[in-house]
Amino acid sequence: MAVCIAVIAKENYPLYIRSTPTENELKFHYMVHTSLDVVDEKISAMGKALVDQRELYLGLLYPTEDYKVYGYVTNSKVKFVMVVDSSNTALRDNEIRSVSAGDWRTTPGWWMFRKLHNSYTDVMCNPFYNPGDRIQSRAFDNMVMSMMIQVC
Amino acid sequence: MVTPLSASPRPLPAGGDWPQLQRVRGVGPGFFCDTLNMSPTQWDFPVELCCRPMAFVTLTGLDVVYNAVHRAVWDAFCANRRADRVPISFKVLPGDHEYPKCRPKRTSYEWYIPKGILKTGWMNKHLNLVPALVVVFYELDWDEPQWKEKQSECATRVEIVRQSLQGRNTKVAVVLIQKKTPLPPGEDVIASERAAALCNACELSGKSLFVLPHTDHLVGYIIRLENAFYEHAQTYYYTEIRRVKSHKEFLNKTTHQLLFVRHQFKIAFFSELKQDTQNALKCLWIDDVWANRYLIVGICRLCFQHNTPLDAIAQFRKHIDLCKKKIGSAELSFEHAAWMSKQFQAFGDLFDEAIKLGLTAIQTQNPGFYYQQAAYYAQERKQLAKTLCNHDASVMYPNPDPLETQTGVLDFYGQRSWRQGILSFDLSDPEKEKVGILAVQLKERNVVHSEMIITLLSNAVAQFKKYKCPRMKSHLMVQMGEEYYYAKDYTKALKLLDYVMCDYRSEGWWTLLTSILTTALKCSYLMAQLKDYITYSLELLGRASTLKDDQKSRIEKNLINVLMNESPDPEPDCDILAVKTAQKLWADRVSLAGSNVFTIGVQDFVPFVQCKAKFHAPSFHVDVPVQFDIYLKADCPHPIRFSKLCVSFNNQEYNQFCIIEEATKASEVLENLTQGKMCLVPGKTRKLLFKFVAKTEDVGKKIEITSVDLVLGNETGRCVVLNWQGGGGDAASSQEALQAARSFKRRPKLPDNEVHWDSIIIQASTMIISRIPNISVHLRHEPPALTNEMYCLVVTVQSYEKTQIRDMKLTAGLKPGQDANLTQKTHVTLHGTELCDESYPALLTDIPAGDLNPGEQLEKTLYVRCGTVGSRMFLVYVSYLINTTVEEKEIVCKCHKKTHPKGVVLQTGESASECFCLRCPSVGNVEGGVATGHYIVSWKRTSAMENIPVISTVITLPHVIVENIPLHVNADLPSFGRVRESLPVKYHLQNKTNLVQDVEISVEPSDAFMFSGLKQIRLRVLPGTKQEMLYNFYPLMAGYQQLPSLNINLLRFPNFTNQLLRRFIPTSIFVKPQGRLVDDTSIAAA
């Protein structure tokens, strides 16, 4: 179960960020923001390879004591960041290991990001949405909420 | 474990992590956490654990103070102890030094109940007190005359050392310091005899007797010596390991769990002393249980030493996961946090140490994370201490001090001082327990947590900086700032927060920025820092702030209070004492009437007033007033009034015309808010129109708005000058403008003279251009112009101005910027009567043309002479002065008008021809041909005036090549032939010389023709006679065909070649296909 889901613009400002209401929102904002260090580094390390690939699952960005932060970047450099409770068994280390083994398309983490990406694409397809604006979409909200509740 | 003061038993961790320990009475998972008050630095790990242990060897019999030789020996042992030397720590002691006593051996452990895992002094004892080897230095040469006496003295010294060791297994060695270099072994008979005797007397094996000649090669001997010592030390530690292992056999697995731990630890420690780190690691890894808080540091250090950082990290994680859940006594839970913090810090230190020794860390795995986590636990400790240790001031520290022990130190690691040696938790003395806890809590209350937290955070900052984590670094700096705020060091807090603010602002993380600003506002309030207070308020009221409206209202009210020279209300959640101090400071600020104007540059933040300047046009004529609008919008919750707005330009003379000011009393700021143009209503765009007349000197220049200043408050009280550089815009507006430009959203219609903020585009500069001239300029001429002609151009200027034109000037000639050669070959003059030469310019500038009254017209004639053929652009430019009035101001305008007659092409019209016959004297072959002379045409246009001079155009005639031809040949042949129809060809040969010509003629056959006639002949042509040759060619193929070639060879003139001949006679002919009959069936069919 995700505790925080964020969409970050190409320029690194938040387009959308939602966390479990029961916890300190600011903490997650900081967590997502600091994770961009790793995202930036991973993207620049990949360089041109990223351009060729249509989207990219960045895997585990960094672990904290209580949470794990995962990242995903689209071909238009929009980033998705997901914070998962460390105690969550759905996204355990063994799955992260399988990511490094190259079989990452089968991991639930990737599928969650896929779902998020699809939903984001729907938002972008809305002719009334101006790319770069903060996302205010009920459909996207509902999707994010479902991912934050459901144990995937 | 059941804590003494809580009734409910603590739940055990899931799984069987502690099965064996449970059976040991009183030792539960909480045991290792139950550590307290070991020393002033109670949370530090024993230093012995954190450093790499080395074998301990003592040297006796050395007088390092008075004896130079001994001093040199000692120095050689101590100096340059680099990594390539064996790991020994040396100490010089007197021969009769008392070593720690060895406890009598236990023969049975049956009744022995251990009091703890490890005594606190044990590691120190084996590192610094009990040597592995004692070396006795003695000065004795083999040829010593008083050998007997010396030998027995040496034996006595060895005996004394043995006694002082009292049954320990420590090895003893003797080193003889000798003046002479020894002979090679076996050669010195006396030496071997005496050595054997000495060993016998001292009860030493031969391996423990060494000779140290005091010669040039001292260091070399010393290194050999210490290598030998090292071997002895290793043997010692090996026997110690064997000894400890032998104890294990006596142990009872149920009651002696602690002893198992102790022995295992001792084995590991001796192994490490023996530098057998692999074995040490193996011993420490036997069971997770062993990985208690002390051991983990040792394990991780060894892992790093073996360059297996991942093992170290994994081991540490495993250990932390285990520890995390074992909080221990609830009243003392801050101790758990303190421990956790210490563990993370120690791990971070070890990691960092390993990196310094060459380990490579990465962005996601660097010591910074451990320092950060350590800081997190330190923060937690602070929180817990705050709630648990908030005793009333009247609560006295218990007397006698339960944390005091008789020796001042704890006997065993990890035990409560008031429970020394007691392993049962059967609440033998609940009162004692209670007092003990109180003492610990009161002690904790005095701890300066913030300092620790800040140190850890700054350690982490340094690491993250190294590993390219700028955002993490900023986040930690925010935390540091907040911690300084809690520690009431508001200056430092503000410095840090202010430093990182721009990072969050530039990346548009408004929630985070707002949170930081809120803390910063509190700091500036508490220090009564006016400028900072105002700056942060401005931004917290702005559109980047995510504060709720009630908060914004409160801040706005405070801001207005400050501007009215009053004190603001305190910020919420501030320390009460600090607020009291702050209120005094604010009161002082009020009474101090001084410079209270604060200019704040807004380009680096997002204030609550936005500004955009826009010139109405990208350029203005100088006789039209320059107009521009300043748009203002406030984002605060309540209307706000400003007292002054001024605009500055690059030409400061205009500044005075662009000021809006309203003399308001300070108290009026709140009144009449919705009226007047000085009031900004939240969300509404206010437009302020400015106009001024540009100076005539600025014609052709750019007028730029360099800044816009908006003054809030009153200059007599306090006021803030918001300063926008250029035409407005702040830290967030460029991104907003970009988004607005991308947007296709239709904006709702607004009432007249209202505009959408997003639709306003800043235009901060305009050009001043000259007045539109009210004259016409006509040009009359008759193209084309001819080369060298004095071409006439008539310029007519007609004035339509209402007043007199003064000082009219004309510039005419070749338009600059064309081919440079044209400038050389074009000349302009006002006088057509004489031909102009090279000295005349291509462009005549500023020809005075005098004044011109309204409606009048002026004509000017120009002559242009062009030396080369080609297209030229000419330019006629008229400028004049005129007095005009703009906005009741009289200005002198300079107007000008340009005209370009296009493309003056030089060309010929009709053609006339003339024919001359030239006779060339026979000169033989002239190189380059014969010149035929010049052709001069003198001419003048029919339209040209009388006085225009006649032009002579000289044409150089071409050179011709003259050749001598001895035999003229020409051919008579029809213009075409037809396939299979006879084609008669007659060649005429004429001798024009005075000589008889011998001629050889031959005709080469051709595929395309059959022919009849003389194929090869030799004949003679007399002077002045002709010879004819007739051939009948019969074409075989249609098309353009090569004729059978005629070759002529003149015997007298070998120079006469066929090439020359071919110039006179045709070489090919067109052959038409055979004609068809008219009634051909094929035609009918077609």
Image: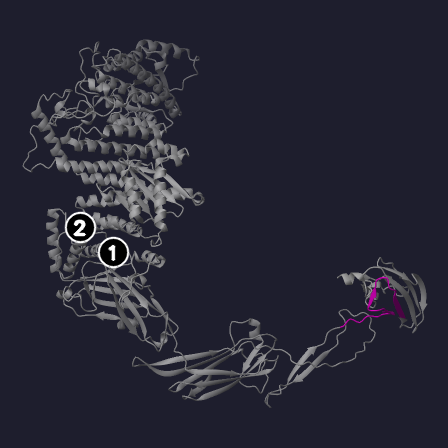
- B238 relative to B491, above or below: above
Q: Residue at x 36, y 76 (%)?
A: B622
Which contiguous range is marked in magenta?
Answer: B960-989
Q: Alpha-carbon neighbours of circle 1 within 10 Å: few (<14), some, or many (≥20)?
A: some
- Pointer 2 residue: B522
Q: Amino acid at mark 2?
A: Lys
- B393 relative to B549, above or below: above
Quarter that holds the C terminus of chain A: top left
- Report the side of B394 relative to B24 (left or right): left
Q: Residue at x 74, y 73 (%)?
A: B959
Q: Secondary structure at mark 2?
A: helix
Instruction: Decide whether residue B583 is among the magenta residues.
Output: no
Q: Quadrant of residue B540?
A: bottom left
Indicate the position of residue B769 as horizontal and vertical percent values. Answer: 39, 74
Q: Amino acid at mark 1?
A: Arg
Residue B490 in view, yes or no = yes
Indicate the position of residue B745 as horizontal and vertical percent values. Answer: 33, 58
